[in-house]
Image: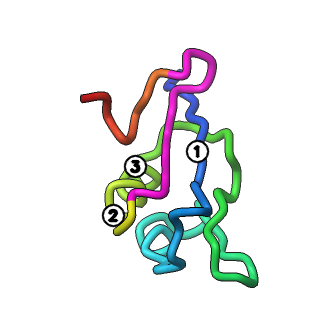
Amino acid sequence: MGDRWHVEVDRSLCIGSAQCLHHAPGGFRLDTARQSHPADPETDADERILAAAEGCPVEAIAITVLGSGEPVFPPEE
């Protein structure tokens, strides 16, 4: 069984570009204020979710390994 991830969007950074929806359809939703939310904050590791985080123009998406809290994105320096 693969890793499970915790996905979080920092809404103070989110600019509503919807790049996350482009990279991971079904993985994110925009609310009425065009702020992104993960469709499911706890999800199986998914390359599309990672691509969404990497493609976010303001790096508002953080992914950690569920349980350990180990960062997936952004990576530790």
Q: Secondary structure at mark 3?
A: helix
Residue underneath mark 3: 50
Task: Name the residue at the top extreme.
Answer: 68
Residue underneath mark 2: 55
Query: Measured along the vertical axis of the image, is residue 9 above or below residue 67?
Result: below
Q: Position of residue 44 (x, y in %)?
A: 57, 37
Residue found 54% across the figure and 22% down from its top: 69
Quarter-wise, where is residue 26 in the image?
bottom right
Query: Measured along the vertical axis of the image, is residue 67 above or below residue 60?
Result: above
Question: Left or right: where does residue 56 sit relative to residue 6?
Answer: left
Of residue 68 and residue 23, the one placed in the foreground of this image is 68
Question: Left or right: where does residue 15 sit relative to residue 34?
Answer: left
Q: How crowded is the residue under tag 2: few (<14 C-alpha within 10 Å), some, or many (20+)?
A: some
In the rendered image, residue 68 lying in the magenta stretch gets the answer yes
Q: Secondary structure at mark 1?
A: strand
Instruction: State the extent of the magenta-drawn residues as a range.
Output: 59-69
